[in-house]
Image: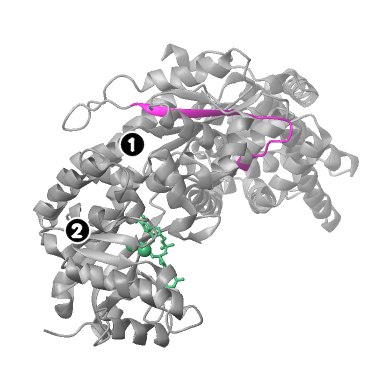
Amino acid sequence: MASATQGRPSLWRPSMFSVTWQASTWLGWAIVVLSVVRLSPEALQAMGEPLLMIAAVIVISELRPIVMTRLIGNPVSISLAFVFATMYLWGLYPAVLLYAGSVLLSEFIQRKPPWKFLFNVGQYTCSMAAAWAVLHLAGVQPSPFDPHAGLSASDLWWIVTSWIVYHLVNLALVAGLAEDGESTWWEDFSDQFWFYTFATLAVLALSPLIAIVAVATPYSWTLLPLLLLPLLAVQKTAEMSRKQEHQALHDPLTGLPNRLLLTDRIEQALVRSGRTEGSVLVMFLDLDLFKVVNDSLGHHAGDALLIDVARRLQSAVRPGDTLARFGGDEFVIVCDGIAADEVTTVPERISASLMQPFASLEREVTVSASIGVALATDTSDAQTLIRDADVAMYRAKERGRNQVVLFHQVMHQEADERLQDSVGLRRALDRDEFRLHYQPVVEVATGQTIGMEAMIRWQDPHRGLLDAGTFIPAAEETGLIVPIGYWVIDTAIAQVQSWRTKIPQASHLWVAVNISSRQLLAPGLVDHLGRTLQETGVPASAVHLEITESALMSDLSAVVERLAALRSLGLRLAIDDFGTGYSSLAYLKRLPVTTVKIDRSFVNGLGGAEDAFDRPIVDAIIKMAQSLHLDVVAEGVETREQLVTLQALGTRAAQGFLWSPPLPEQEVPDWITAHVPAL
Ligand code: C2E
Ligand code: MG
Ligand code: MG
């Protein structure tokens, strides 16, 4: 795709202009040229078969490169052992040529960009030359391994020192490439140190043996390939650890970086950019209506689509950008070195890349994405950038999906007040953070449970479990109560069906669901309930709807019509919090309801100090309900005195902490087994 390379040349990197890149590349290549000039054909011939065999082994090993990459990293090659052996035997020049050749071969196989292999050849050559300088200064002449020259113990010490010098110079040059700032250099250096030290030393440890075997007897060089075996074992181990690392850092479905690696990449990008304002851009991308694909075509198709989307996105991002799967249908893209005009063009290009339908599924699917974009500030870190982009993404969803929205600090303040924020509630719904708890409703005479009232809770990842009262008002205000309410209805009905079929005593248990006024008047409620009942096979009489008295008083004729339609489905309808809405008896008579729930505030005072005030009210409510042939449920019963009074006044059903608070769903089966009579 042509657009993939827009914006930044992919072959050359800014780090090319760093002092480290320039110095090590030029110096290294100068040494390579010097080696070519100084190495006469006669000298090469004198090295004979052992050198040829070493060269052959290097080619074989490079064809299967050992690459131990960490988050950032350079390869540790097993050719290194043979190159060092060459250096002990015949000095720097043949070693440099072999090494440069092996690096070129390996980089070619791995299709590294030119800036990288130019640097790598230079960098390895410089490291090699540093090692050689140690040997040279220490007076370890070429060929200490020659059986006629003899190898002393002090030579060995210097040899080990040369390895260490090689390794340190190598790491320092690579780390120096990443960034010019001093602290970063040190971070990179120490970050890579332990990981590479062990592997490099394990490889180099074999180099003296290679040298000995190469020249021990006239034909001992034929044994050299044998030494590849232990080196391959090192390689295998390294590969395995690399694979494990890969698994820990990548999403198994798409193979893209996961959250952990994403965070690291953002931090790196921030460091590279020197935390310059606006230079790092993070896009949070959420597929619109992905759930529909999953639900209608199945999870298998959903997975296939995600893989296709990942591919499409990968080809739309620029080389060097990071595309990560954040979870579910969420992807995050990180771009650095962004120019001001690219802040809008890049996300739009990404969004456009998804426009073509996806054809690999059984049916062509069109996908769009809501994209939130956040730009780094000088105080950004990975977490805040992701969070900001996420908040902006939810704005994009709110504005009707398939949009790109740039994060603004104002959104942040709003997001902080998530309680009042529809973004937070919508996110909670999308992320399945709502739960239902169930409070038993008991028959006061026997203490047996006859039904369960579903009460919504929000399992907020940051604030813990929240009660309905803390977020239902915001949900009602923003209208989100409608989708949330459908979720409650579906979940509660499916749940009661599961209890009714799985637990023998529960076959007559009913569930009560709270409905707010907006939900009651929303078009589609009656159809939705009708459909859900039909699909689950739950009898309508097993579902009670509770509507607060104040909600019923809003638009009487519309409410009556709606209640009548619900009643005709066979549902039972309760007036919740009765006594708090100031409704008149005449009004009550017109509502087609089946039950009255006496508000907790009146029950509270019964049998206590307030008894003289509350008893007559409760008494009147019960009498009125009886005369209208309505069931009565007393709410919020907490004490035995309240219960005794309620019983004396003729209440048949009640609920409250006296029996149980609302229970998490998984505790209900045990409750039913203990408190519902067998029929
Ligand atoms: P509600 O329907 O009158 O529910 C009773 C509330 O009183 C619940 O609070 C319950 O936990 C609490 N409660 C139960 N027994 C006792 C007791 O003995 N003493 C005391 N002090 N409190 C008791 P919650 O769950 O916070 O719900 C508050 C209100 O939020 C509910 O009042 C209901 O109107 C609404 N609500 C709850 N779940 C939903 C829902 O799924 N949809 C809608 N639209 N509204 C809901
Ligand atoms: Mg209720
Ligand atoms: Mg109530």
Where is residue 504, by image quadrant? bottom left
Q: Residue 408 carries which label?
A: none
Q: Is residue 109 left or right of residue 36?
A: left
Along the viewing direction, whichever of 641 and 512 lies nearer the viewer: 641
Along the viewing direction, whichever of 487 and 638 lies nearer the viewer: 638
Q: In this view, does 117 lie to the left or right of 369?
A: right
Quadrant in which the N terminus is drawn: top left
Q: Is residue 106 left or right of residue 301?
A: right
Within 8 Å of ligand 1, the CB of disc 1? no
Does residue 624 show up magenta in the picture?
Answer: no
First reached walking from the N terminus: tag 1 or tag 2 = 1
Q: How crowded is mark 1: few (under 14 residues within 10 Å), some or many (20 or more)?
A: many
Q: What element carries label 1?
A: helix
Going by the numbered disc 2, the residue's amino acid type is: Val
Residue ID at (57%, 18%): 343
Residue ID at (24%, 68%): 624
Q: Residue 306 carries which label?
A: 1
* Callout in the foreground (1, 2): 2
Q: In this view, does 662 lie to the left or right of 389?
A: left
Eyeballing the image, is 298 above or below 604? above
Circle 2 sits on which residue?
A: 593
Spot occupied by residue 493 in the image (x, y as percentages of width and height)? 21, 59
- Determine the CA span between mark 1 and mark 2: 48 Å
Question: What segment is highlighted magenta in the picture?
Answer: 368-383
Spot occupied by residue 192 in the image (x, y as percentages of width and height)? 69, 45
Spot occupied by residue 626 in the image (x, y as percentages of width and height)? 20, 71
Spot occupied by residue 552 in the image (x, y as percentages of width and height)? 29, 50
